[in-house]
Amino acid sequence: MSAQRVKRQGQQGLTLIELMVALVIGLVITIAASMVYVTTTNSTRVTQSVSDLGETGQLALEILGREVKKAGFFPAQFSAKDQSLQPGSFENTKLPGNAVFNQGVFGCEGANYNPATQACEARVAGAPDGIVINYTATADFGDAAVIGNHRDCNRDAVSGDAANGAALATGRPLYVSNRFGLIATTYTAANGSTVNTRSLACHGNGSEAATTLAPQLSGFDDLVIRYGVYGATANQQTPDRYYTATEVSALPLAGDLPLLLG
């Protein structure tokens, strides 16, 4: 065999079948790698979304929980003539006769509180709930011994509420009222695209001239609030059941409050 023939045989390439098999194998590997990448990316995105939802929900609970803990608060250093100081009692110095301000917590089922009418809006089935949280606090007269939070949820001083005028002049407790609910909000990204969502919003009595709730935290779909009501059993530690705001309002009264509201 001549050297020229040996050189020609050494330069032989792949057959068409071999080339097709190699292409198929490469294609399968590429598809598999792409599927792994897409699955991993989707999993990461879902995990991040769940984490974001959990964080948003936790922040909302902290905001509402902090306010609920103060519901019905009355500075104990004032005399009993300002407050009966009985469990469950509450003094409405905001708008006497308006049920929204008669107690520490008032709920709006399927509706938000309307600052313009100072009442709950008309109920809409399936719509998010709203809640009004009321308490009292001492005025800020430059005294380091101020007790309670005299600013509302939007950081406006409640001394701006005309209903607190007499209390402010005499150094009596100021009425604080924070109203929470969900409102529709739209955000525009840098690329011009828009995102429609709902935000947890609040209106405080430090700015009664405002007629809308101000958004505080975005990324919500719904807000459902239930109220635990205790029975008549002595030393009962858990509610008998949980009620909607409408159901709580229909319960028998103990003084000026729903019976043993927990």
Image (tube, grey):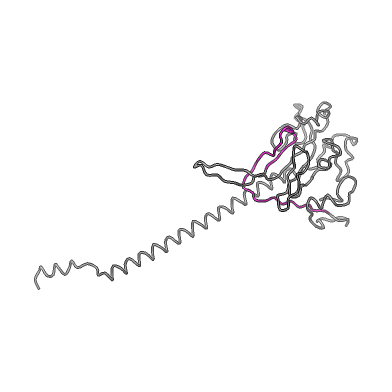
**Residue 251 image offset from top left, x and y in percent:** 86, 52
Task: Judge left or right: residue 36 versus residue 96.
Answer: left
Q: In the displayed image of the protein, which residue is found farthest to the bottom? A: 1
User: What residue occupies the far left of the structure in this picture?
Assistant: 2
Q: Nearer the viewer, residue 221 or 140?
A: 221
- Give percent across and percent down for residue 193: 52, 44
- For image coordinates 49% across by 42% down, the residue present is 191
136 up-or-down from 45: above or below: above
In terms of depth relative to the viewer, which is nearer, 12 or 249? 249
Q: Quadrant of residue 8?
A: bottom left
**Residue lying at 86% horizontally and 37% vertically, measured from the top left:** 96
Compare residues 70 and 202 and report the one nearer the observer: 202
Is 259 in front, or is 237? 259
Asked if residue 98 lies in the magenta stretch, the reply is no
Q: Residue at x 73, y 53 (%)?
A: 125
- What's drawn in magenta, residue-wise? 201-229
* Residue 209, above or below 71: above
Percent across and percent down for residue 30 are: 39, 62
In the image, residue 221 lies at what x, y percent? 65, 50
In the picture, the quarter occupied by the N terminus is bottom left
Q: In the shown orientation, is residue 192 left or right of residue 104?
A: left
The verdict on residue 214 being magenta is: yes
- Give the tally of numbered discs: 0
